[in-house]
């Protein structure tokens, strides 16, 4: 399992497993960036948190849950007063395949994020899971309870969105779909080739055929286009935007942005604001 090492003890780090769960408590409101390397179900037990994931922004509060497809980063910040408690459940593709029958799913849409409200029977299931975790035993029972919880989520979804979400995670995707889902995880072409399980030369050849340009050029263009959207529509700091868009450092982000647009991200945002004010005047 690709789980943040700070969550695991030495025995867990060396174990071959398809699921990992942990109760997680935060006492201070601070902005945290998390790289999502496994499918992640977050269940809020107390407090509220603001999340930014790809093009989605959401707030999850006590009694709600959010499911993140692996890939990219979550930027999150506690917005409630006092403590924030959550149950984090990391789930491999193989574990999810044991639960869901894909042939009954609807047409797939590329949804990277799913959010929902827990009903009473789901809350009861979560309470049982937390009780078992507190007792630090009964791993097999916890796994069964998590399976039941996932089935409850699917059965409670009347829109078909959760089924589409599971389908997007589990069904084989095209080369282009894989590129779109994985490129923000990578700092360079070598990392992208590793994630795609192919050599750099094979990646470049297939990329040129599918996209008509080099992977390096395309990756930079996608990151910069997203940065422009965030500069135009949010009040995130320049550092936050560079990180969320997948740049390795603030200096790299600023240099790449200025090369493409002729000004720094900060100047771009100020000029945009001046133009908006001028139009209103």
Image (cartoon, rainbow, N blue to C red):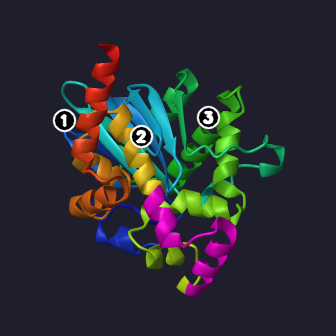
Q: Tell me how many marks there are.
A: 3
Question: Of marks 3 and 2, which one's residue comes earlier in the chain?
Answer: 3
Front-lying residue, 134 or 204 = 204
Mark number for residue 46?
none
Tag 2: Cα neighbours inside 10 Å, few (<14), some, or many (≥20)?
Answer: few
* As drawn, 151 above or below 223: above
The residue tagged with tag 1: helix, strand or loop?
A: loop
Q: Nearer the viewer, mark 1 or mark 2?
A: 2
* As drawn, 210 above or below 118: below
Relative to residue 50, is residue 151 drawn left or right?
A: right
Mark number for residue 29?
1
* As drawn, 184 above or below 277: below
Tag 1: Cα neighbours inside 10 Å, few (<14), some, or many (≥20)?
Answer: some
Q: CA distance from mark 1 to mark 2?
A: 26 Å
Where residue 218 sits: x, y (%)?
Answer: 51, 64
Question: Of marks 1 and 2, which one's residue comes earlier in the chain?
Answer: 1
For label 3, the residue is: 153
Where residue 57 sits: x, y (%)?
Answer: 42, 34
Relative to residue 243, is residue 1 drawn left or right?
A: right
Q: CA distance from mark 3 to mark 1?
A: 29 Å
- The residue segment tinted magenta is 201-221
Front-lying residue, 214 or 81 = 214
Q: Residue at left 30%, top 72%?
A: 10
Where residue 158 sits: x, y (%)?
Answer: 71, 25
For label 2, the residue is: 229
Where residue 14 sits: x, y (%)?
Answer: 39, 75
The residue tagged with tag 2: helix, strand or loop?
A: helix
């Amino acid at each position: 399992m690709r789980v943040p090492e700070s969550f695991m003890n030495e025995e867990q780090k060396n174990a071959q497993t398809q699921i990992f769960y942990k109760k997680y408590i935060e006492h201070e409101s601070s902005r945290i960036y998390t790289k999502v390397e496994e499918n992640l179900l977050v269940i809020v037990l107390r407090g509220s948190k603001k999340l930014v994931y790809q093009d989605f922004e959401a707030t999850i509060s006590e009694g709600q849950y959010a499911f993140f497809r692996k890939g990219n980063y979550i930027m999150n910040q506690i917005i409630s007063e006092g403590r924030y408690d959550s149950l984090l459940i990391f789930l491999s593709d193989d574990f999810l395949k044991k639960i869901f029958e894909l042939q009954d799913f609807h047409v797939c849409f590329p949804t990277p994020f799913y959010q929902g409200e827990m009903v009473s029977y789901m809350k009861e299931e979560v309470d049982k899971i937390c009780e078992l975790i507190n007792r630090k035993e009964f791993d097999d029972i916890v796994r069964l309870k998590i399976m039941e919880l996932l089935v409850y989520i699917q059965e409670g979804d009347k829109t078909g969105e959760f089924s589409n979400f599971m389908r997007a995670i589990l069904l084989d995707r095209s080369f282009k779909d894989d590129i779109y889902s994985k490129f923000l995880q990578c700092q360079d072409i070598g990392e992208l080739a590793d994630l795609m399980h192919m050599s750099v030369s094979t990646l470049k050849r297939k990329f040129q055929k599918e996209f008509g340009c080099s992977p390096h050029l395309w990756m930079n263009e996608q990151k910069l286009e997203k940065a422009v959207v965030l500069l135009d529509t949010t009040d995130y700091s320049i550092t936050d935007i560079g990180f969320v868009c997948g740049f390795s450092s603030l200096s790299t982000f600023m240099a790449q942005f200025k090369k493409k647009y002729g000004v720094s991200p900060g100047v771009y945002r100020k000029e945009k604001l001046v133009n908006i004010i001028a139009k209103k005047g």
